[in-house]
Image (cartoon, rainbow, N blue to C red):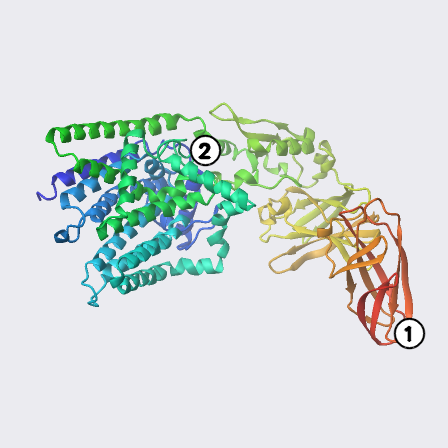
Amino acid sequence: MSHLFSRTNLILATIVALAAFFRFYRLEQIPPGFHFDQAFYTLDVLHLLQDGFAIFFTAPGGSEPLFVYLSIVGVALFGADTPLGVKLTSAIIGLATIPIIYGFARTLFRSPSPSKGEGWGEGQSARLGLLAALFGAISSWHIFYSRDGERIGLTVLMVLLTFWFFWRALTLTLSLPRKTGEGIGVGAWVLTGICTGLALYTYPAARALPIALLVVIAFAVWDDRSRAREYLKGIMLAFAVAALVFAPLGIYYFFHPDAFISHTAQVSIFATHATPGEIAAAFFDNARKIALAFLFIGDPGSIRNVPWRQIFGPLVGVLFVVGVVVMLAAIFSRERLQRRRAVLLLTWLLTWLALSLFSDDAPNYGRMLAAMPAVMILPAWGASEIWERIRAPMARRIAAATFGVVVLTSASLVYRDYFVTFANLPELYYTFDTDKLEVFDWVKRNDKSAHIFLAPLWYQQGTLSLLTRNLPLKSFESRDTIVLPSNAMGRDALFGFPPEQEKKIQMIASRLGALGAREDLVGSNGAKILLVYRVPTQNLPDARDPLPALAKGSTFLQPQKTVRANWADQIGLLGYSIDATDSAKRNLEVTLFLHALAPMSEDYTFSIKVRDAKDRVWGQEDKWAGSNSYETTRWRAGDVVIERFYPGLTACAPAGEYRVTVEAYNPKTMQVLGDAIALGTTRAGTSSGNLPEHLEPERALDIRVAPQMHLMGLTLTPNELRAGDTFSLALFWRGQGGGAPAQRATIRLRDATNRDFVLAESEVILPGEGRGLCAFLDLSAPRDLSAGMGALFVNDVRIVNVSIIR
């Protein structure tokens, strides 16, 4: 009992209480709002509670599952409409990390063999452990992430536990008599493997952990060659256990490689900088910023730090510098254990600093956070070394008093910086999505009296997606779409856009015209947080006769032709428009005026096809409404859905008349819903040319058939010619500079008996330099062709050999 209330334990309890204060005080208020990451974790918890199991979560950018599983209790206690569940989870994890830092640091510096004189005594190592825990407890770096509801804090804990068991395994192996072939401390190696495997279920930064372990093992083998086999056997055992633990997630990554690599690849300096010079410049700039982050200028992002706050204040920073010097000196110590602990801490530190060094946005405190325990041990080591060199009792009392002032001052500065300065930053309103909470309140106030359509950018945002999950909120991409519900329910229609989409609401307002008016939502910060366009009930379409209501709108709402057709009495076609954006009328725009006749249980795709007289398709676009954002299962009976399609003609489509059709089909079964509906005809002119990369010949060529005619490819259909049958030939020409005049091209076919047949003569108007042209020809093979191998010629130049059959 006396041991329980020992001086060391009482001090540790005080440190843990201090850590708890910094991690739980006003947790429901700071940070404010409901950040989208917290919301996505909560959505993942709901997914688990509903479906029972998941090994990986795909939204928003992919998430390992361990933190979500641990958050189930918090979300169950506080509900899914508050971030407190996940914030409490991360705060508990952050608090648990502090006493474990103490335990690890104490073990790291305690001598396993006092008789050999290596390491420190029990009292010295305990004092260092307490100092490390204290610096961690008042670290604004760690406090921030403990309160933020992020899973990266769990990575810190698992990396710390892994290194603790790893150090235990190393010291057990080191204590073995040389060349005895005795055991290798199996239990410690197995626990190292378990913690390594579990760490990989927390956050991508944990993937650096096996590399760090290998670096330390390599040093141990080099430094203690007589036990090399034992070290290698131990690490192989640990990695085998880690592989077993990691196997379920590893199998998922094997079948979904993008989930493993996509985020890491996106933020790498190798992805964001093109040339070796740019990469080198980014590397050195990152190194400079990371070095400054410890004592001078920290991470500026308010989503990752009290903006610009360095890791250590000036007082503790001095001890950190001393600790770094002591660590570097220890690498060259004569004591093997001293060398080894210095190498472990240096490897730990550099491994996770490298994650920020080789990625964008340095110093990124989140990517560096797994190094936090090692970073906090360094000022503790520095303070301990200073203390050991002070012998006079009076000097020690002065030093202790000075250290007390340092700790109190540092803790006070942390309190001020986080709970006063940071808590009152105006940008936190947006950083932690307080604006989304106020938009949600607006949605709740209006969802009973209006049909609400929210722009996809916010409809898919984590906070709003979570909070509105049980509300009849809808969304569609409005670039080519208008959705107007019927007036049957007596509700207005509200279209909401985030402030950054001013152009989108201007576009929808211009299209709807006098149907409605704009009214914007102002947040508690006095700024616009939602741009709203309201169409009152009386201006919405009638469910039985929708078209008259559209007359008050722009031409976008006016079909060129009205029709009365439907697909299986589920989707009606009220009318259509066919336009083109170019003088040749090849860039077609087809607008459909669709009408929901009944609720639908399947998501139907609409397919616009542009066909020639031979029923060949030369232009096509298939999509759901809303550019694939407003599937038919979301349609409400009576909805008018106006959707624009872009079935532009392909590069090889010849000039002439085309007919346009539309059909609806189920993309899962490819079953067509009803019959295709003819929309009308359009006449297209000759193509003026395309970018070469948009031309796709079946066979690439590099042939000059005339001084100013360069053939870059062809497509022959079919590849085998039958005498008397028709075939098609597409010739791809490279553009010429200087406005070359029309060129004459003679197409000839030579059969197996060397007889020549002129198939076509045409003029080709070549585009300018840097462009290309596809000339399409329908040709007929003469009936008296001789079977065998023949050839096609353009202007006496052979372009391709062909097989001729009869």
Q: Residue at x 31, y 60 (%)?
A: 235
Of helix, strand and loop, which one carries label 1?
Answer: loop
Of helix, strand and loop, which one carries label 2?
Answer: helix
Between 777 and 216, the one nearer to me in the picture: 216
The C terminus lies in which quarter of the figure?
A: bottom right
Between 101 and 602, the one nearer to me in the picture: 101
Q: Residue at x 31, y 41 (%)?
A: 375
Q: Which mark is residue 784?
A: 1
Taking the image as drawn, is residue 142 in sight? yes
Residue 98 % position (x, y):
26, 41
Residue 141 % position (x, y):
34, 36
Left or right position of 374 against 716: left
Q: Residue at x 89, y 73 (%)?
A: 754
The N terminus lies in which quarter of the figure?
A: top left
What residue sits right under mark 2 in the picture? 431
Q: Which residue is drawn at 78% across and 60% down?
A: 714
Q: In this view, does 585 lie above or below 398?
A: below
Q: Bin the neighbour count of mark 2 within 10 Å (Cα to Cα): few under 14, some 14-19, many 20 and up.
A: some
**Farthest residue, direction top:** 526
Left or right position of 698 against 284: right
Q: What residue type is labelled 1?
A: Asp
Residue 775 % position (x, y):
82, 55
Q: Distance between the residues labelled 1 and 2?
A: 78 Å
Q: Is residue 631 above or below residue 453?
A: below
